[in-house]
């Protein structure tokens, strides 16, 4: 008597392996997309905190512009020369930019009750530590969203637990 597996048994095992792979693979790659979103949110929040710190320490307003078309954050001094002229660079390399990674987008921003989802959104950090305030929502590839809240009185930047506004 020969020992071994029949063709049917081998096919059943291959079908089971392919089904398990099809079900498990998306669950394995999903956290990577969330990781990109979390990293981007932390970088944007850190950049905003840095802008607030610079505004307070240098006694000079800092402007943070969110560009929805290019998914980019640009921070510059309000008194930077040439801000009306895009070809002129601010002196001393005072302009900072952060382009969001692929798969992470600027979804929406709020200034009070006004929602912005295209064009530019601006937050100003004043020399006294306060800001113009607002909320910025970033979205990942799987449409998971996270919100950054900028308090207008204290200028403090917080990463909100959820993307819904209260």
Image: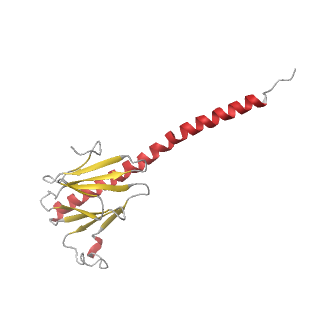
Most distant residue in the top direction: 1
Asked if residue 76 is positioned above or below residue 14 in the image, the reply reads below
Q: Quadrant of residue 14?
A: top right
Horizontal and vertical percent position of residue 55: 18, 62
**66 sits to left or right of 133:** right
Image position, residue 13 (x, y; %)? 68, 31
Q: Residue at x 15, y 54 (%)?
A: 152
Quarter of the image holding residue 18? top right
28 sits to left or right of 149: right
Q: Residue furthest right?
A: 1
Question: To which quarter of the image does residue 120 belong?
Answer: bottom left
Rendered view: 13 above or below 158: above
Question: Residue 79, image x and y in percent?
Answer: 18, 73
Name which residue lies at 37% across and 56% down.
105
On-image quarter of the C terminus = top left
Q: Quadrant of the N terminus?
A: top right
Q: On the picture, is 151 further left or further right than 28?
A: left
Residue in the foreground of this view, choosing between 111 and 50: 111
Q: How is the image coloured?
A: secondary structure
What residue is at 43 percent from the left and 55 percent from the top? 103
- Left or right: 136 as drawn, with respect to 142: left
Residue 22 in picture, x, y percent from top left: 58, 39
């Amino acid at each position: 008597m020969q020992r071994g597996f029949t063709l049917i048994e081998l096919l059943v095992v291959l079908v089971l392996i392919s089904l398990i792979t099809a079900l498990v693979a998306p669950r394995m790659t999903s956290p990577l997309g969330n990781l990109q979103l979390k990293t981007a949110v932390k970088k944007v929040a850190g950049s905003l905190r840095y802008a607030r710190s610079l505004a307070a320490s240098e006694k000079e307003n800092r402007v943070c512009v969110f560009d929805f078309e290019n998914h980019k954050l640009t921070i510059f001094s309000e008194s930077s020369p040439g801000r009306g002229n895009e070809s002129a660079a601010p002196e001393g390399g005072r302009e900072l930019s952060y382009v969001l990674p692929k798969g992470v987008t600027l979804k929406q921003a709020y200034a009070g009750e006004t929602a912005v989802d295209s064009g530019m959104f601006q937050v100003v950090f004043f020399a006294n530590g306060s800001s113009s305030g607002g909320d910025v929502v970033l979205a990942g590839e799987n449409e998971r969203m996270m919100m950054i809240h900028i308090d207008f009185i204290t200028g403090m930047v917080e990463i909100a637990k959820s993307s819904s506004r209260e």
